[in-house]
Amino acid sequence: MRSGLKKTTMKTINIFTILAALFFVMIISGCSGTKGTSNPKIEGIEWKLETLNGKTVALKSGSSITLSFDGTTAKIGGTAVCNKYFGGYTKTDETLVFSAIGSTKMMCDDNLNESDYFAMLGSVDGYKISGGKLSLMSKGSAVAVFSK
């Protein structure tokens, strides 16, 4: 009778050991990797400008100001008020900086000064994504908000 009790005790100990190990693996897995998910991917999406410096953007022409990120080449591109633009970017989980921004030089006749948009891009030092919206940040404040 003792050997049967010993086998049952050993099985119980093995089951508890396995369950404890799985529990700790789940806790460790749940704690790691959360920092990287604070800002989902910005690449491969054509973002459309909604607000610039706190003001809603609605162009007379009916077109949208857009911004796209190419993660392979670290380049940006899009359409401003009426001109196509391009440049580079560097980002981490929280920082974003644009560089070498250039554009075509067509004359724009709309209700938004295109240079205000380009000046905003030059001031960006971070970004946040929440609810499908991309906020470009400068010194902790949102200077532009884009939607998908």
Image (cartoon, helix red, strand yellow):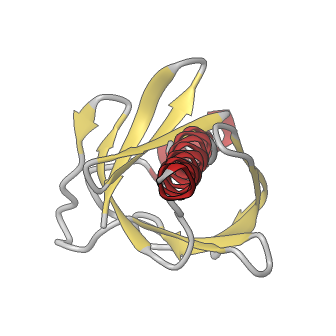
Residue at point 70%, 74% (across, down)? 71
Q: Quadrant of the C terminus?
A: bottom left
**Viewer-proximal residue, 105 or 77?**
77
Does the rendering let one see residue 105? no
Count the marks. 0
Residue at point 17%, 63% (across, down)? 60
**Viewer-proximal residue, 88 or 120?**
88
Q: In the image, is residue 133 above or below residue 108?
A: above
Q: Is residue 40 left or right of residue 56?
A: right
Q: Is residue 10 left or right of residue 48?
A: right
Q: Is residue 101 left or right of residue 145?
A: right
Q: In the image, is residue 87 above or below residue 51?
A: below
In the figure, residue 124 lies in which quadrant? top right
Does the rendering let one see residue 101? yes
Residue at point 54%, 52% (across, down)? 22
Measured as percent of width and height from the top left, residue 141 is found at 47, 21
Residue at point 17%, 72% (across, down)? 62
Measured as percent of width and height from the top left, residue 115 is found at 54, 47
In the figure, residue 82 lies in which quadrant? bottom left
Measured as percent of width and height from the top left, residue 145 is found at 35, 44
**Viewer-proximal residue, 22 or 111?**
22
**Viewer-proximal residue, 102 or 128?**
128
